[in-house]
Image (tube, rainbow, N blue to C red):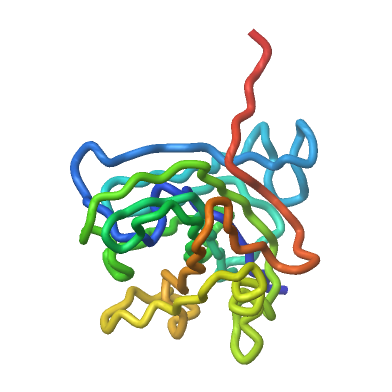
Amino acid sequence: MRRTVWMSALALALATPALAGPKDQSKDALIAPQSMQGNATVDNATTAFVTQSKGCSLQIKAKGLTGVADGSVVICLASADVQSPPTIPNTAGRSLIILGEVKSGGLTVKADLAEIGCGAYEQISFNTDLKCYLDSPIYRSAPNEQWKILCLGQAMTPIVNNAIEAKKLKVNDTENVILGECRGTTVGSRLPGPVGGTLIAQRGARTGVQ
C-alpha cells in the first residue's frame, strides 16, 4: 500500500522573499524523537536524513527509510520567525509546505524557492523548526486541504504556489513540489502538522558514546 510522508523542512529555506548569495547556506540532520532507536520508518542508527539550503535552493535527502513504497509522497513543512522589510517589517512566523517522492527507500527533494518570492529582498530568520509526519491525505489533497483550515485556525493566511512554471513531482505529476505557504503576523506562529498524524522525524542530532 502506498503511503505519503509528511515532513517539515529547514526554516532557513522558508518561502519569504530573501536575498540569495553564495554564503547563504546551511545543513542539518533529522532524527526520530520517539526513542534512541527511532521508529518504524526512521532508524536513528542507520537512516541518513539531512536537509541543506543554499540561497534559494532547498534539498532534503534520506537513505534507509522503511515502510514507505516507491512513489510515496513526502511533504516538507519549513517553519521560522522571519523579518524581511519592506514585505515583512515586523517579525512574523511562516511555514512552507514542500513535496517530494520516495524511491528505493530513499528520498531526494529539490525545491526552487524562487517560485514563491525568494531572492527579492534580504531577510533574517530564527526559531527554525523541522518535523516529519506520515501521510494524511486529507491534510494535503483537495477538496479538504486540511492544511489551509489549520492555517486559518492559527490566525495565519494560506498561500498556494501559483507559479506559472512551478516544478512538479514525477510520479504524482499534478502536484507542485512547493505546495504553498502559511503566513502569520506574530512571532511564533506555526502551521500544525496533520491532525492525528504520526511524527517520524524532526530536526535534531544523535550523538554516540565517545
Relative to residue 52, is residue 56 drawn left or right? left
Pick the front one: 109 or 179: 179
Residue at (52%, 42%) from the top-left corner? Answer: 127
Residue at (77%, 50%) from the top-left corner? Answer: 40
Pick the front one: 65 or 76: 76
Relative to residue 179, is residue 156 drawn left or right? right
Residue at (59%, 69%) from the top-left corner? Answer: 72
Pick the front one: 174 or 88: 88
Query: Residue 202, located in which quarter of the rendered image?
Result: top right
Find residue 36 and report its horizontal and vertical position in percent.
Answer: 76, 31
Residue farthest toward the front in the current orientation of the protein: 90
Count of marks overlaid on the render:
0
In the image, residue 203 sits, relative to residue 143, either above or below, namely: above
In the image, residue 131 sits, relative to residue 37, either above or below, namely: below
Relative to residue 50, is residue 90 drawn left or right? left
Find residue 57 and report its horizontal and vertical position in percent.
Answer: 30, 54
- Quadrant location of the C terminus? top right
Q: Is residue 143 visible?
A: yes
In the image, residue 17 sits, relative to residue 51, either above or below, namely: below
Pick the front one: 83 or 6: 83
Residue farthest toward the top in the current orientation of the protein: 210
- Quadrant location of the N terminus? bottom right
Query: Residue 207, located in which quarter of the rendered image?
Result: top right
Find residue 68 and report its horizontal and vertical position in percent.
Answer: 66, 61
Q: Is residue 99 visible?
A: no
Residue at (45%, 85%) from the top-left corner? Answer: 174
Relative to residue 107, is residue 23 drawn left or right? left
